[in-house]
Amino acid sequence: MKYLTLLLSLTLIACSCAARVDIDWSQVRPIEEFDHYRARLSSNIHHPSVAANPNRRIVNGQEATPGQFPYQVALLGQFNQGVGLCGGSIITNNYVLTAAHCVHSGTNSNNPIVSGVAIVGAHNRMIEEPSQQRITFTSAGIVGHPGYDLFTFRHDIAVIRLDEPIVYTDRVQPIRLPARSDTRSFAGFIGTVSGYGVYDTANPGLSDVLNYVANPVMTNADCIAQWTPQLVEDQNICHSGDGGRAACNSDSGGPLTVPDGGSLLVGVVAFGSGTGCDSGIATVFMRVSYYLEWIEANSDFVADP
């Protein structure tokens, strides 16, 4: 066995089966608390009515049933200042899809974090449930989009190759991605976003259990009306914040899916309103169909024609 300590807060024990990882959750913090993300918040590019403080957390949603989102990943990343929590999606048994700012400590994709842990099959992240697999990864397995820019929110997407393959079970499965020929915008579909972020603004702590919200996917034109043309482009897809339901703090990198013969991954959480996750402002995602060619080129995922 070998031991890897992540700022003394994570002790990882790798074995010939699946990696066992003991986590001190009291040391895990939202990704937005780290310096690289705080630098992002100094950007002056934001909607005039929205403070430049994008957050990520599931608010005013509901608790998932165990196994409801078998593609969900709780992603822990080792930064210089500690361990950050994000979301992600299983795309193959070797690769996870997430946001670039979840696994890079600088302003671009040149500075991947040293290491981290992907937790799959979890309902309650605080305990090591029998359904869970906790698998490590290192900087060598991280590929961020070469156009990623921390300050402009562009191309905020990354893939992670895990140190060991994921074992598929009834509670651990890959998510389906759009086919190469799929040109739908998905506007009007009911989109579902899930994660372990804060679920109640009156109780601003990370959720122990997986939560989700469902709201309509918006047209980019309607989303631009809430943000700006500089922040919402073809590479983005937006999820309505109607009813104060939204993804925010520590849901970064997590999945936005729509029903299409099962769940179809259409977005990766990028940013949302800084006035509060229950403000009604749309959450903005990286549009998965826009990045299919890049995902295929940098992982072992193969899209349908």
Image (cartoon, rainbow, N blue to C red):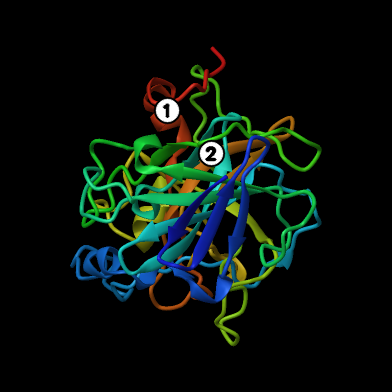
Residue 295 - label: 1
Please state which amino acid type lies under the numbered disc 2.
Answer: Val
| Camera-nearest label, 1 or 2 | 1
> Measured from the top left, where is residue 20 in percent x and y?
64, 50
* The label number, if any, that marks residue 11 in the structure image: none
Element class at badge 2? strand
Rounded to the nearest angstrom, the CA distance separating label 1 from label 2 is: 13 Å
The quadrant of the image that shows the C terminus is: top right
Residue occupied by mark 2: 266
Q: Residue at x 46, y 51 (%)?
A: 116
Label 1 or label 2, whichever comes before in sequence order: 2
Residue 125 position within the rendered picture, expressed as x and y whole percent measured from the top left: 67, 62
Front residue of this view, candidates 24 and 281 = 24
Q: Quadrant of residue 196?
A: bottom right
Task: Report whether 228 appears left or right of 191.
Answer: left
10 to the left or right of 194: left
Q: Residue at x 43, y 56 (%)?
A: 77
Find residue 260 and report its horizontal and vertical position in percent. 69, 32
Which one is in front, 253 or 215? 253
Residue type at the position of mark 1: Ile
